[in-house]
Amino acid sequence: MQNNEFEAKIKNRMIKFPSVDGMSQLEMSMIVGQVEEKINKIEEKLNIVDSSKLAILAAYDFAVELYHLKQRSETNREADSKKVEELVEKLAKTLEKEIHGEQ
């Protein structure tokens, strides 16, 4: 095994995964565990034994989760930007009142 690979067992198969910069073996093991858990849930729910179909469905499920996270992140970013703009506007009005009140 080269040091740019990470080996782990999923569904009783040893698989070599490319390592990820900045990620420890423990973190990569946790991700592999999430993948296996997802595959097991799909296998149990849909009663599928075809490992390639399970892998595709697991990848799809993770992609859906990622899509939802991106959508939520974008919504939060827009809400945060709007709030910052409102606060800047209030601050500007308050400063303007202070400046005109002193003169």
Image (tube, rainbow, N blue to C red):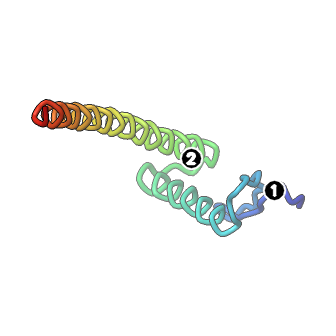
Mark 2 residue element: helix
Question: Is 19 on the left or on the right of 85, as rendered?
Answer: right
Question: Is 78 on the left or on the right of 38, as rendered?
Answer: left
| Residue closer to the observer: 95 or 14 | 95
| Residue closer to the observer: 75 or 95 | 95
Pick the quarter of the image with the C terminus.
Answer: top left
Residue 54 on image: x %, y %: 56, 47
In this rendering, is residue 16 above or below 76?
A: below
In this rendering, is residue 70 above or below 19?
A: above
Reading the image, the residue beneath label 2 is 54
Q: Quadrant of residue 7?
A: bottom right
Identity of the residue furthest to the bottom in this view: 26
| Residue closer to the observer: 28 or 91 | 91
Reading the image, the residue beneath label 1 is 5
Residue 8 on image: x %, y %: 72, 64
Q: Nearer the viewer, mark 2 or mark 1?
A: 1
| Residue closer to the observer: 46 or 95 | 95
In this rendering, is residue 37 above or below 81?
A: below
In this rendering, is residue 29 above or below 81?
A: below
Residue 70 on image: x %, y %: 43, 37
Q: Amino acid at mark 2?
A: Leu
> Which residue shows up at 63% across the image and 49% down it?
51
> Which residue shows up at 88% across the image and 61% down it?
1
Q: Quadrant of residue 6?
A: bottom right
- Mark 2 to mark 1: distance in Å? 23 Å
Mark 1 residue element: strand
Q: Amino acid at mark 1?
A: Glu
